[in-house]
Amino acid sequence: MSDATVTDLYEVTMAMSYLRERMTRPATFSLFVRDLPPERGFLVAAGLESSLDFLSGFRVGAEDVDAFASALHRQPRDLAPLLGMEFTGTVRAVPEGRIVLAGEPLLEVTAPLPQAQLVETYVLNQVSHQTVIASKAARCVLAAAGHPVVDFSLRRTHGPEAGCHAARLSAMVGFAGTSNVAAATADGLTAVGTMAHSYIEAFTTEEEAFRAFARSHPGPLTLLVDTYDTEEGVRVAARVLRDLERGPGSAVRLDSGDLEVLARRTRSLLDAAGLPDARIIASGGLDEYAVDDLVRSGAPIDVYAVGTRVGVSADAPFLDSAYKMVEYDGRPVMKLSSAKMTAPGPKQVFRRPGYADVIGVRDEPPPTDGVPVLETVMRDGTRTAERPTLEESRTRFAEDMTRLPLAARRVRAPLAPRAALSGRLTTLTDRVRRHIEDDVLAPSADSRRHERGATGSPRSVPRRGGQ
Amino acid sequence: MSDATVTDLYEVTMAMSYLRERMTRPATFSLFVRDLPPERGFLVAAGLESSLDFLSGFRVGAEDVDAFASALHRQPRDLAPLLGMEFTGTVRAVPEGRIVLAGEPLLEVTAPLPQAQLVETYVLNQVSHQTVIASKAARCVLAAAGHPVVDFSLRRTHGPEAGCHAARLSAMVGFAGTSNVAAATADGLTAVGTMAHSYIEAFTTEEEAFRAFARSHPGPLTLLVDTYDTEEGVRVAARVLRDLERGPGSAVRLDSGDLEVLARRTRSLLDAAGLPDARIIASGGLDEYAVDDLVRSGAPIDVYAVGTRVGVSADAPFLDSAYKMVEYDGRPVMKLSSAKMTAPGPKQVFRRPGYADVIGVRDEPPPTDGVPVLETVMRDGTRTAERPTLEESRTRFAEDMTRLPLAARRVRAPLAPRAALSGRLTTLTDRVRRHIEDDVLAPSADSRRHERGATGSPRSVPRRGGQ
């Protein structure tokens, strides 16, 4: 089986129907986040590259067809029209690392309808998950206010794959390192980590543990000091570092207790021991809120290690993301019901100073002070450019961040800029809504829809060309 | 690279040191959850089988050594002692599907210390993540009070791998199906799913969409009715189902709006249309809390589809899990500092009626009314038994659930049973604590530790054999 089976079954049932009905004209689907989670002032676009990998390699093979048939209790021959299907479409997207706002398309797929439908689940999964994590990690960097932040999340992410994404994405938004060896190797990240409490416990005293560690590891040491009694642990660590002349560049790690109080006490002890250069690393259940509190308290912590809460984005582990069809065969479409209304048609985001973004119709001229954010990243199923390096994405992020209003960068109660709809997009939205109300809903409301349908009366569908 | 690199770097630095110090005697690590998340009355053990797969296949290859060396800025030859290391230990664990409480070991690894340490990150990741999800899904089944529940989470889980775990684990706790084709195929689950709003929008009217869908899909249909106007959608669906004589076994799906109100209205419309057997499926942001509210309201919903919030365990996306060394070379160990104190020594959990569980020393005789919960599942690095089938795990879960006190099963404000420590474990804990306070901390507290260490005075380490 290929990744083509990593899909909700309904994508398959819909694709089958589209093929049977010969509805294979181009459709555009738009992937966006309706509303930001609480306590988020921005999102960091991510998940594009693995989506493009998926789309590049997308091919429905014989085993996939067997899986689809089995899931549907059908014969594989019923699924034959899907066999060999590849993704031949166009993708326009916000490059990884750029900052995006609620309602702004992160990605738009234009492809023959069955293809654009079949790839939904995977692409939505990648972009939603990775954007969640990149956005959470970015907040930690903001909270740390210049102190290095490192990623310790692998042990409690939702699987190793999620852990590797967390490591890469946190590096993209400015983390200084990760504990994750696989991710560090794959993505060229700085690997960090020293010892656990169990290491200390395996020796009969802390001091023996520290000295043994030093024997195996030349250069600066990081010693975990809170296994038994933190202050005493600091004293022992200081003695070992001094004895071995390993002070410069070395550090102690605090992993429990009142980190502010312990950091102050630790700093005093290290200074008194003649180790003013030894750093203090804090870890243990930290996230951007805790880091923010510690930084504001003035706690003398040099490096923040964040883990679980960031790797799973504990306070907002998912996004209210959607992959919505906005156009089929040149006809803009939208969903009317309840709160989930979406604007129709392919779109472009124009970034204006101060993040006064405008979401417009794809081809409309940019506002004089606006720059388009979505780029064509795939054409005819092929990437239009090399995969950006992590450094390039990191630069993109850093540049976008410098321009983000301060109120959006706050860790607590941030004020998220809101994108406006352009005049053209507003007009189009009104027109399509009116069309649905007048021509789709009204006739059937008075029970004439079926009759009209049967007579084949034409529907005044607004076409993009007619705008 | 193998999965051996899916590890925090510190496991590697510790293993290197242990090998250098010839500390390769058996260590036991215990994996447990300190406290349950809020609104959890129990946990469902999971993640064991993929952990055993990992341990069975664990072998540090040359590429892994290269990765470790690169991460540490060392030469591969410095890591040579790790090359070829396999996992040769014993694993005792709670089988997947069994209910566990806070503080109860889910898994204990006994292996040469470097091995037991190197596998920490992966095993902790698997057990923590999968136990989170299985526990969340179990709550949905309880909330649904007999109504079928299905899994729609794949699109927003933390990667496809997490989505496949969510599908399998939710089936284990009683879900009736999943939208995830890959998981359904791999694990023999029932696949479910029909159409999205985009499908309706791709046609000029809802009715055309429903009729087209029926042409591709023989048998009962599930029609999504809330794309434009829900009540009108139900009328159209009813007309199509009647016209095509496809009513029996068919259903309509509500995916937005006030589901209680809409379900009542939908039921009336379907009944009035002569479709009393057509079912109502509800979806859209549901979790156990929403399902509980709907069930208690008496809403005539037949099937609940839960997705994102369950697949990421939105209200509690991680567990306060730990993988702690509890014994090294026959010497029970524990961590004293702050709130993270853990009881020393290998353990067993004895389940008594009403979940009045007792956590005891591994080899102590069970209480007269207690049955051991941890089983030996791996010996000398090899599974002791076949992998249980999903059906076997499902049966284990169902049996445990029938015995769980009602107060623990509540969706809101559940009362979690608390395991007690046995007299022997309490005595051992006190003894080890006293030993640490007297012999590890006290001497250095009065600055004599280093001198004592230097004279090599023996430490009165309590040994398990001496209990």
Image: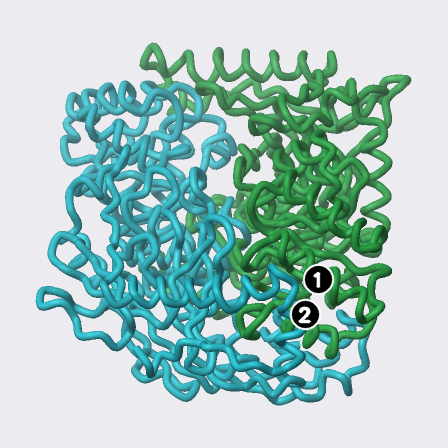
Chain colours: A cyan, B green
Identify which amino acid the numbered label 1 is placed on: Ala
Q: Mark 2 touching mark 1, by CB under 8 A?
A: yes
Image quarter where the C terminus of chain A lies is: bottom left
Left or right: B69, with B19 as reference point = left
Identify which amino acid the numbered label 2 is placed on: Phe
Image quadrant assignment for residue A443: bottom right
Q: Of the numbered discs in the image, which one, if any, rests on residue B286?
A: none
Which residue occupies the foreground of this view, A421 or B16? A421
Q: Which residue is mark 2?
A: B210
Q: Residues within 10 Å of mark 2 (few under 14, many from 20)?
A: many
Q: Is residue B378 visible?
A: no
Q: Of the numbered discs in the image, which one, if any, rests on residue B237?
A: 1
Which residue occupies the foreground of this view, B452 or B406? B406
- Determine the secondary structure under disc 1: helix
Image quarter where the N terminus of chain A lies is: bottom right
Q: Position of residue B253 (x, y in %)?
A: 67, 55
Task: Say which chain tag 1 marks.
Answer: B
Q: Residue at x 34, y 75 (%)?
A: A92
Q: Residue at x 69, y 73 (%)?
A: B213
Q: CA distance from mark 2 to mark 1?
A: 7 Å
Left or right: B378, with B312 as reference point = right
Q: Is residue A416 visible?
A: yes
Which residue occupies the foreground of this view, A207 or B142? B142
Q: Residue at x 74, y 64 (%)?
A: B239
Left or right: B168, with B242 as reference point = left
Relative to A32, say whether B171 is above or below: above
Left or right: A66, with B255 as reference point = right
Q: Position of residue B64 (x, y in %)?
A: 48, 65
Task: Say which chain tag 2 marks.
Answer: B
Q: Residue at x 71, y 54 (%)?
A: B168
Q: Position of residue A285 (x, y in %)?
A: 41, 33
